[in-house]
Amino acid sequence: MGGKSDKPLIVKGKRLDGRTAEEIRPISFKAGVIKNADGSCEFTCGETKAIAAVYGPKKVLPKHLEDSTRAYLKVHYNMAAFSTSDRCRPGPSRRSKEISKVIKDALIPAILMEKYPQTAIHVFIEIVNANAGTRTAAINAAAVALVDAGIEMRDIVTSVAAGKVENQVIVDLFQDEDNFGQADLPIAIMPRTEEITLLQMDGDLSPTELKTALNMCIKAAKTIAKAQRDAIITKYKKEQKDEKQ
């Protein structure tokens, strides 16, 4: 974020990809994409694609991480080496560790952790193509994968970012907007209650702009949440149909 683009990012109220300020990119979810995982999901948002896999609840290793009152949740976020135009260095990085923790903190309020004492739930997320919004995409994919794994949750977790570009508040930034924008505000919520489980901000927003950005995110998150639920229902109906055949 920062710097100045060599081309205007908003022209006559439209962004470079033709969207209005409140429009999100085309999205799709597919649950159950990894056969050997307990739960999985592929999520695309524009050109950004995330794949999440959940394993567990299972035995906690190493043993000292075990909690007699609740589950131990471990999140592994990674960007594939080929996911960006500048090849990523393979293996864990400081950024991937930080985002793993952010995702974990965003998911825990929704998971009924007390239902799974003395067990571990592992969430693996791979970003296979990145065009901004990778942490929000990771959260969206992980939430569906958790539901697919049968993990009991208070609500699904849905994530999207707003920002400011050329002094205008917009939602769901793509790469150029993220690179040259004035602010970035990723959030995650539980849509039914609108409880916020993640709120970060890079850049500056006035109180009025912040309120506008949050309202945009909540509205967009509810659209994304419907697509999340539809993906889970679609998989369930397919399984029911396959059982009858």
Image (spheres, rainbow, N blue to C red):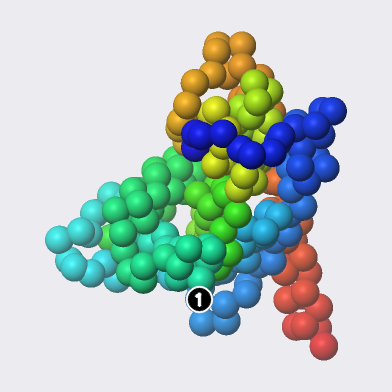
Q: Quadrant of the C terminus?
A: bottom right
Residue at 55% over, 11% down: 207
What type is the residue that disc 1 sits on? Ala
Residue 243 on image: x %, y % = 75, 83
Neighbor class of circle 1 (other Cα within 10 Å; few <14, some 14-19, many 20+) is: some
For this orientation, the residue located farthest to the front is 6
Residue 102 on image: x %, y % = 40, 45
Can the viewer see residue 172 in this picture?
A: yes
Q: Secondary structure at mark 1?
A: loop
For this orientation, the residue located farthest to the bottom is 245
Q: Nearer the viewer, residue 8 or 150?
A: 8
Question: Is 33 situated above or below 178?
Answer: below
Question: Is 128 situated above or below 201?
Answer: below
Can the viewer see residue 119 in this picture?
A: no
For this orientation, the residue located farthest to the left is 64
State the residue position of label 1. Answer: 37
Residue 118 on image: x %, y % = 28, 60
Picture quarter containing residue 29?
Answer: bottom right
Looking at the rendered structure, the number of numbered marks drawn on it comes to: 1
Left or right: residue 227 compared with residue 18: left
Q: Nearer the viewer, residue 204 or 211?
A: 204
Residue at 73% over, 76% down: 239
Left or right: residue 178 compared with residue 125: right
Residue at 42% over, 65% down: 88
Left or right: residue 180 compared with residue 219: left
Residue 111 on image: x %, y % = 47, 48
Residue at 63% over, 72% down: 32
Q: Nearer the viewer, residue 13 or 5?
A: 5
